[in-house]
Image (cartoon, rainbow, N blue to C red):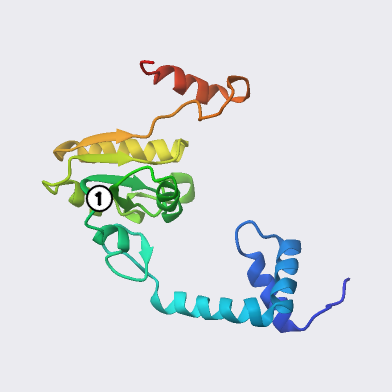
Amino acid sequence: MASAVAGPEIERLIQLLARLPGLGPRSARRAALHLIKKREALMTPLAGALQVAIDKIQVCKTCGNIDTQNPCTVCTDPRRDGATIVVVADVADLWALERANATNGRYHVLGATLSPLDGVGPQDLTIDALVARAHDPQVGEVILALNATVDGQTTAHYITDLLQEANVRVTRLAHGVPVGGELDYLDEGTLSAAMRQRTLF
């Protein structure tokens, strides 16, 4: 059995870092060692930033984004198109769309997608709040920007059924060949979706 090479405080730091996505035990050890070596330049400011995040970050009561203000920066931006609501499963998806500068609409974060196998049902998502927002006369389109997975598509169909009473157009992201993609490397599902959703050239 390997003996401990560091005190319990350092081992705890490594264990906590190992819980982060993309970091395994070895990567966590390297990260911890780097933080310790750069205590003044990196660890102290990081600890301060984490404390500020704990104290100030909150979930937007309108869309579900995370920010230091409530409603969030996106919801309070007057340049945003209030007629469009882009529905995403997670804040990471919202950030990805913003990085791509893909839309000028407002967002709605569901919190996850429906997944009966994982015990995630409609009551666990913010679907009721979305339906209420979609009934606002200002809203004209709801874009379902959900993953092209079974759970994502199940969620999209469920939401579409609930929005039939609202006077909105419900659209979804196109599925198919990615920009720069080569047909030979694509899976059959992607190719089939691309063929079904072909457009005029």
Q: Residue 180, relative to residue 131: is it above or below?
A: above
Q: Nearer the viewer, residue 186 or 16?
A: 186
Q: Nearer the viewer, residue 69 or 25?
A: 69
**Residue 28 lies in what quarter of the image?**
bottom right
Residue drawn at x 39%, y 55% as measured from the top left: 111
Q: Which residue sits at x=32%, y=35%?
A: 157
Q: Residue at x 33, y 46 (%)?
A: 87
The image quadrant that residue 63 belongs to is bottom left
Q: Residue furthest left?
A: 137
Side of 20 relative to 86 (left or right): right
Q: Indicate the amino acid at tag 1.
A: Leu
- Residue under the image location 40 percent in, 41 percent down: 146
Pick whichever, 127 or 37, lies toward us. 37
**Which quarter of the figure is the N terminus placed in?**
bottom right
Question: In this orientation, does residue 62 appear?
Answer: no
Query: Would residue 38 be found to the left or right of residue 73 on screen?
Result: right
Residue 27 vs 179, above or below: the answer is below
| Residue at numbered disc 1 | 130
Tell me, yes or no, if residue 107 can be seen here.
Answer: yes
